[in-house]
Image (tube, rainbow, N blue to C red):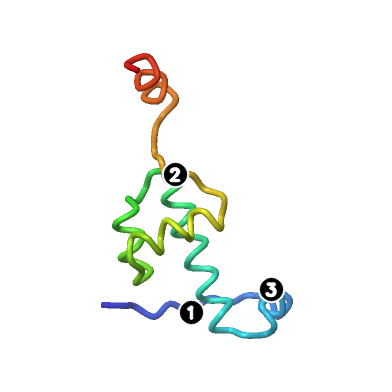
Amino acid sequence: MTKPITLEVSEDAVRLFGGDEARFARELVETAVVKWYDEGRVSSGKGAEILGLSRAEFLDLLFRHKVSPFQYSPEELAAEVNRG
């Protein structure tokens, strides 16, 4: 199920995407979901679901946004390294 949301943005912002409102809207949502993933607010599975992507496609999106697919805190990462 989807819910329409209306946002007011400057024409300049839409022009960044060639004036294509649909492309702007898609990029806006993708960027938000990637940020939420990076903050640990959504999992890769939930992020993929929100965007209607497979998990592999979502991981590719993370790569394009230069976001690591690994969600480890510094403490968890140190513990992993020390286990090895």
Query: Is 62 rendered above or below residue 50?
Result: above
Q: Position of residue 12 (x, y in %)?
A: 73, 76
Residue wearing tag 2: 39
> The residue tagged with tag 3: helix, strand or loop?
helix
Q: CA distance from mark 3 to mark 2?
A: 25 Å
Query: Is 76 rendered above or below residue 24?
Result: above
Q: Position of residue 71 (x, y in %)?
A: 39, 39
- Choose between 40 and 71: the one closer to the eye: 71
Residue wearing tag 3: 13
> The residue tagged with tag 1: helix, strand or loop?
loop
Q: CA distance from mark 1 to mark 2?
A: 25 Å
* Amino acid residing under circle 2: Glu
* Amino acid residing under circle 3: Ala
Q: Horizontally, is 1 left or right of 72 in the view?
A: left
Q: What crowding class fits label 1: few (fewer than 14 Cα within 10 Å), some (14-19), or many (20 or more)?
A: few
Quadrant that contains the C terminus: top left
Q: Horizontally, is 68 left or right of 21 in the view?
A: left
